[in-house]
Image (cartoon, rainbow, N blue to C red):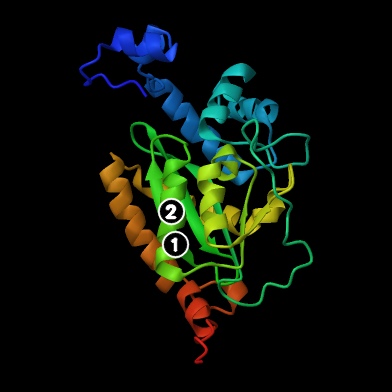
Amino acid sequence: MIDAGDKLPVVRQCALLDVARSTAYYRPQPPPEADHALMRRIDAIHLARPFLGSRRIVDALSDDDIFVNRKRVQRLMQIMGLIALYPKPRTSRPAPGHRIYPYLLRDLTIDRPNQVWCTDITYLPMAHGFLYLIAVMDWYSRKVLSWRLSNTMDEAFCVEALEDAIAGYGTPEIFNTDQGSQFTSEAFTGVLKREHIRISMDGRGRWMDNVFIERLWRSVKYEEVYLKAYDNGIQARQSLAEYFRFYNAIRKHQAMDRQTPDQVYYKNLPFPQTA
């Protein structure tokens, strides 16, 4: 809203919008390097034992001779978007006023590509700093249809990934997400409504409702991210592009009879019906 390059002075713009000047001039500061190192360790603990809450993560850190208080761990977990995976009243929180949709996959037989797509966001540590990764996946084949990186966990890069998947692969019957504010936003759900896609959202505390993309994050981090320690976003994008090509076309899945996601997706994709 505030444009520093506009002819109208920033002071006047703030007055017209009833915004404090301190808000207009504020620039968020990245976490210090000590926090980055701690965040990388918290991420590794969470990935190995996702059921641990902040108290037990503090205990796990102390076992590694890393002594920090719980409030610091809670603050860093909030920045990273990490939540312990066990049933509790509130997990991913929608923004006030955002509509929550019912979970549509319970007892549903998923037996073909493009029947159900799903998505999620994860934290990616780098050598200096961190990024957020979103991926859109076909539930049946586990194929990654699109992905995006961002240094902020907002709705814009989520909508870009969704639009890219639709442009490349058409539309699913159902799209499943958690109840995070990025996915309950009008910008994101508006795209789904525009394409007449049924919207499904995980129940609160129900991490198993989107389990396949949780498994994707484990693969991405152990097989790619933790081995590379990206120096910057450009390197991260290039390296992840290579990994997702490998994941889709070369990496065989035991649960899919040693086939790749591409093989399962394209082999089972129905042909267009002629008139």
Which residue does the image show at 52% across and 89% down from the upper left? 273
The residue labelled by disc 1 is: 165
Locate residue 221, reporting x and y percent. Answer: 47, 50
Say which of 13 and 66 sits in front. 13
Question: Which quadrant of the view contains residue 110?
Answer: bottom right
Neighbours of disc 1 within 10 Å: few (<14), some (14-19), many (20+): many
Locate residue 36, reporting x and y percent. Answer: 42, 28
Say which of 62 and 174 sits in front. 174
The residue labelled by disc 2 is: 161
Which residue does the image show at 69% across and 48% down from the upper left? 207
Question: Which quadrant of the view contains residue 2?
Answer: top left
> Would residue 214 be found to the left or right of residue 144 on screen?
right
Q: Secondary structure at mark 1?
A: helix
Which residue does the image show at 55% across and 35% down from the upper left? 81
Using the rendered image of the protein, determine whether residue 223 is visible from the camera's viewpoint. Answer: no
Image position of 68 with respect to 258: above or below: above
Q: Amino acid at mark 1?
A: Ala
Q: Secondary structure at mark 2?
A: helix
Say which of 8 and 76 sits in front. 8
Locate residue 203, reporting x and y percent. Answer: 74, 47
Image position of 264 with respect to 38: above or below: below
Locate residue 108, reporting x and y percent. Answer: 75, 68
Looking at the image, the residue that sits furthest to the bottom is 275
